[in-house]
Amino acid sequence: MPGRKYTEKEKQDYLELASEIGHSRAMRELGYPKHWNTANTWAKEHGVTIALDELKQKAAAFNDWYQTEDLLITMQEAIARGREFILEDRDLNADGFKKTVEGMKRAIETMQLLQGKATSRNGTEKDQDQADPFAEALDAFLAAEQSQDAPSHQDSPERA
């Protein structure tokens, strides 16, 4: 069942009040619309910017902080794993080493960006879709593991 249709005057009255006191308070005072998404759609359609309520601003800032903290933790883990990979893999070839170091460098630079610090990026790097050092380092790691697990052909009695 579709919701109630509001007149243009009702929408304008709502938007005028909401621009002064915010969505939530305007919805409570006027009793309409019933859903925040409807109110937000009206604001977008009419090009009206409604300031977030103080509580929503705090929640949004808190959410941003958590996202940043999660990314920082992830980058720290990527750096630690890259370091372990370099130190523990005795059969790491030059290409695998380079890819691992590039992945670690990208993780370090991402951490610096998240913390608002300067990085050595100059904007000429390839897009993430074109070159993903983390994926390349993982591929190198998996290839090294597979080569260790594969049986040696030198011991085969069929070789002449």
Image: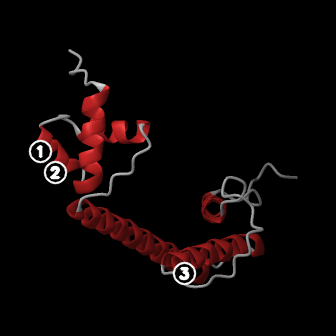
Residue found 54% across the figure and 81% down from its top: 112
As drawn, is 71 to the left or to the right of 26?
right
Residue 20 is drawn in which quadrant? bottom left
Residue 4 is drawn in which quadrant? top left
For the N terminus, give its image quadrant: top left
Q: Which residue is mark 2?
A: 25
> Which amino acid type is marked by label 1?
Arg
- Mark nearer the N terminus (1 vs 3): 1
Q: Which mark is residue 2?
A: none
Q: Which residue is mark 1?
A: 28
Residue 102 is drawn in which quadrant? bottom right
Q: Would residue 63 be visible to someone looking at this image?
A: yes
Helix, strand or loop status at disc 2:
helix
Q: Cβ–Cβ below 8 Å for labels 2 and 1?
A: yes
As drawn, is 106 to the left or to the right of 57?
right
Please state which of residues 19 and 27 is positioned toward the viewer in this rendering: 19
Please state which of residues 22 and 130 is positioned toward the viewer in this rendering: 22
Q: Which mark is residue 112?
A: 3
As drawn, is 118 to the left or to the right of 24?
right
> How many other residues sit within 10 Å of disc 1, few (<14), some (14-19) or many (≥20)?
few
